[in-house]
Amino acid sequence: MAVLDHHHKTTDVHILERSSVFITITQLILFVSFTAATVVIQGPHEYINGAPIPTLLFKGLPCTFCAFIISIILAFSGAFSALIMFPQMENIARIIGYSSLISMASAMALLMWAFYSSSTSRWVPLPAMANGPP
């Protein structure tokens, strides 16, 4: 009987650790998505076809910016929903939380793509040498 009680206690501790990690990750997604949305709203922007596009990273990339915003919205709403649902419907909350994590990863990938695209397009190529390299 003592072996079963020990196994049951370690399983409960493992479940609690997993739950706290899930909640921490979900809270982090909520914080990062809210912060990203706030920074995007406050930053300098230009209007392209009537839509404000931030000029720091997304200049000339309106489709990438729209995909980024959609990913941020999905990440925020998924994380918020998962945190609200977690105590009552744990399995559904986990599925929604994982989809929120995927949305946040997509947003970060789009942000890196925009950073890469904007940094490579702003470089001025060196003039070609007439006689080749020294």
Image: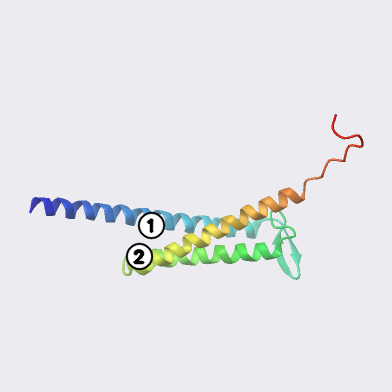
Q: Residue furthest left?
A: 1
Q: Residue at x 24, y 52 (%)?
A: 13
Look at mark 2 in the image and give the residue it sits on.
86
Q: Which mark is residue 23?
A: 1
Tell me which amino acid carries mark 2: Phe
Q: Position of residue 93 (x, y in %)?
A: 38, 66
Tell me which amino acid carries mark 1: Ile
Is label 2 in a helix, a strand or a loop? loop
Q: Position of residue 95 (x, y in %)?
A: 40, 66
Occupied quadrant, residue 12: bottom left
Q: Position of residue 20 (x, y in %)?
A: 34, 54
Q: Position of residue 45 (x, y in %)?
A: 72, 59
Crowding at label 2, few (<14), some or many (≥20) Cα neighbours within 10 Å? some
Is label 1 in a helix, a strand or a loop? helix
Occupied quadrant, residue 132: top right
Quarter of the image containing the N terminus? bottom left
Q: Is residue 10 above or below residue 51?
A: above
Upstream in sequence: badge 2 or badge 1: 1
Q: Residue at x 61, y 62 (%)?
A: 68
Q: How many marks?
A: 2
Side of 71 relative to 83 (left or right): right
Color theme of the render? rainbow
Q: Residue furthest top?
A: 134
Camera-nearest residue between 117 and 68? 117
Asked whether the residues under the numbered discs 2 and 1 touch, taking CB atoms below 8 Å apart as contact, a structural biologist would say yes
Alpha carbon distance from label 2 to label 1: 8 Å
